[in-house]
Image (spheres, rainbow, N blue to C red):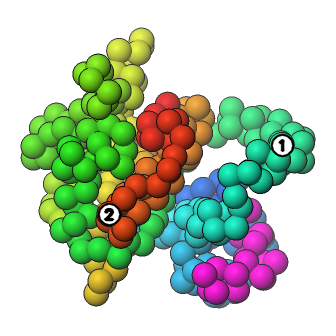
Amino acid sequence: MDSVFKALADPTRRLLLDRLRLQNGQTLRELCEQLDMTRQSATQHLDVLGQAGLVTVVRRGRERLHYLNPAPIHEIEERWISGFDRPRLQALSAIRNQAEEYAMISESTTTTVPTYVYVTYIRASAEQVWRALTDADLTARYWGHANVSDWQPGSEWEHRRVDGSGVVDVVGRVVSSEPPTRLVVTFEDNPDVEPPREPSVVTFLVEPHEDIVRLTVTHENLPNQEMLGGISRGWPAVLANLKSLLETGDVLPQAPWEMSGPHA
């Protein structure tokens, strides 16, 4: 956590994070143009943010896209902000951010919804993380839904409630399955919507290093800001629960909406 505080102590690095918060997935050139900064200087600051886990780089062809990763800041919040304090702080934040909300809504009407990227580090093996992602009984424990499939490319998968109702909230197909390092699925939270819309795509990338695994979840092709808001709340909660289950054997106490996962 020391590296996170060190990275956040510099105003230029905080400004880079602010720019990524407004428009995630920017190239180095785009960031430099916005901040009137040299490539060398921006690269040095981004390297520090990357080492702290605050920025994640995703390659798209020859480009390197930079994404804000909220996981370390989420961990700071969980450590020092109790459930008792959170409602009061949220009320204060709502007042402070009310003026900013209109600017964000105005901008969202003219830009595409960005890709969402979340990174977490888990003290487990790649095989354990893969099983947690694909075993219906395990997903039921930390997600509140059973992810059901044979996980072969082209197969269907279902995100099924475990309350006995048999309701399926998300369906999709397995695009790619490379155990234990890479799983790509389509994600259709409302397949009956009219007119039909192209499904979003979720990629789980499992990168082992000694006894630690870096798990990167990339959610692409989001249809609207509403779904972006839903998954921005859902993925951190789901992945924190997954991490807790693998590292401690138990899940975190969470509210029902957090357990429901990243839905629109």
Question: Mark 1 or mark 2, which is nearer to you?
Answer: 2
Q: What's drawn in magenta, residue-wise?
A: 1-18
Q: Which residue occupies the foreground of this view, 169 or 251? A: 251
Residue 57 can be seen, yes or no? yes
Q: Which residue is mark 1?
A: 91
- Identified at 81% across, 39% down, the residue is 101
Question: Label 1 neighbourhood size at 10 Å, few (<14), some (14-19), many (20+)?
Answer: few
Which quarter of the picture shows residue 6? bottom right
Which numbered dot is residue 249? 2
Q: Residue 129 colored magenta?
A: no
Q: As displayed, is residue 37 above or below residue 41?
A: above
Residue 92 position within the rendered picture, expressed as x and y whole percent measured from the top left: 87, 47
SS majority, magenta: helix
Amino acid at circle 1: Ala
Amino acid at circle 2: Gly
Q: Residue 16 colored magenta?
A: yes
Q: Is residue 261 left or right of residue 151?
A: right
